[in-house]
Image (cartoon, helix red, strand yellow):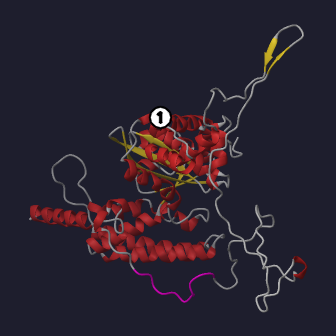
Amino acid sequence: MLVVEAQAARITELEARLKADSTNSSKPPSSDGLSKRPAQPRERGTRAPGKQPGTEGHHLMQVADPDEVVVHRPVACGSCGEGLDADALVQIETRQVADLPPIRLRWIEHRSQRLRCSCGHVTAGEFPEGVNAPTQYGPGMQAAAAYLCGYQHVPYDRTRQLFADLLGAHVSTGWIANAVAGVSDATIPVVELIADAIRGAEVAHFDETGARVDGKLHWVHVACTDELAHFDVHDKRGADAMHDIGVLPGFRGVAMHDGLASYRQFDAATHALCGAHHLRELAGVAELFEQPWAADLADLLIEIKTRVEHARPAALGAREQRRFRRRYDKIVRIGRAANPPPPPTGQRGRPALGKPGSLAKRLDEHADAALRFMTDPRVPFDNNHAERDIRMIKVQQKISGGYRTFPGAQRGMDLRSYITTARKRGYSVIAALRAAAEGCPLDFQLA
């Protein structure tokens, strides 16, 4: 009888795996492939589409000092045909067109003059630092290469074609690779400042995703806040990688992350679990295993989230928190009762609880972390900050299939840390990259 029950549980587990996707499990959207479900239509709201009454509008504004003014003056009357002169002006209507100017390289010639002194010695003027060859590309071109390859993940050969088509600059892929490496290496001191700043943050988000490096599975780890982002690559996913990267070991704030157990090994941090992950997993338990408690708990989490959003920036009252917590504990107890531990198999280790049992156990034992968004108004409901920042790594995998070398992957992480932080803190990305290409990267006022 026990064998039959074990086989039935195993069949249910395997069927659930086949039906699992990004909407009902922790699988990423990129794994759905052609079997991705069609988007569910949203309920029609009561508001009209577009800008709402009373909100600030945004549109293309005219500028006070246009670069060029073209006057269109009629030469004859549109009624009688009589000639018109400038003295007949009664009104001017202006319309402006914002367009790209013709794009071309800007050539700067440096001339070193040699002057002879009365003593007979000839002294030559010094060329600026970095001007080392009879002809070369400048920091603006290097910044563009670093941006396209290191942030937008345009392959080197397509970047070469873009420079040729757009600028008439026939660079080699080798020059592009060297430019990306040079800019990335210049950002290393700033990337270290970013890691230090995240270690001192009140709330930070952490996530990791797989990446191919030199044909082998590696892991990209991200630590970020609203204004900072730090990326690193490691051949491991868990605590060893997190120790080597060095952000989490020194972190004393609230760490928002998913259910990966490795994060919880860092006791100095206060932990918060991502509610969006829980909603997907609960949807999977309700849909694939037909356990009603999961849908009830998902509804409760959404109800708490709505109340918290209405109360912010203040926290929910203590009485309301206790009321929500009692309802939460009651539903989780039902979930644990519906998924009791399986009987011993005689083999070493604990018997597997299965997805529903494991989820109920985690939500029970780490209830404080799961409800951190309710008790701490600084903590959001989900880990979207980290998931958004790390999403482009999957885009890079789709475009290039992976990183060819580990040093190249590390340079890519440094560039992404530098650029993402520049964007979050309101700096011009191209200006920040140009400063790095000139050997003086911006420190974003972190020093």
Q: Residue at x 66, y 34 (%)?
A: 439
Quadrant holding the C terminus:
top right
List the residue tagged with mark 1.
174
Between 6 and 386, the residue placed more toward the observer is 386
Q: Residue at x 52, y 66 (%)?
A: 381
Label 1: element kind: helix
Note whether 107 is above or below 58 in the view shown: above
Q: How many marks?
A: 1
Judge from the rendering whether residue 158 lies leftward or rightward of residue 81; answer left or right.
left
Q: Quadrant of residue 11?
A: bottom left
Tell me where residue 100 appears, x and y as whole percent: 64, 60
Judge from the rendering whether residue 58 lies leftward or rightward of residue 343; answer left or right.
right
Q: Main secondary structure of the magenta part?
A: loop
Note whether 430 is above or below 66 in the view shown: above
Q: Residue at x 34, y 68 (%)?
A: 24
Tell me where residue 377 appears, x and y as whole percent: 61, 65
Between 141 and 134, the residue placed more toward the observer is 134
Residue placed furthest toward the top: 119
Q: Quadrant of residue 296?
A: bottom left
Q: Residues within 10 Å of mark 1 (few under 14, many from 20)?
A: few
Tell me where residue 400 appears, x and y as whole percent: 38, 47
Whether the magenta-drawn stretch holds residue 3 is answered as no
Tell me where residue 331 appears, x and y as whole percent: 39, 73
The boundaries of the magenta stretch are: 41-51
Which amino acid type corresponds to the residue marked 1 in the rendered image?
Answer: Gly
Judge from the rendering whether residue 49 lies leftward or rightward of residue 426; answer left or right.
left
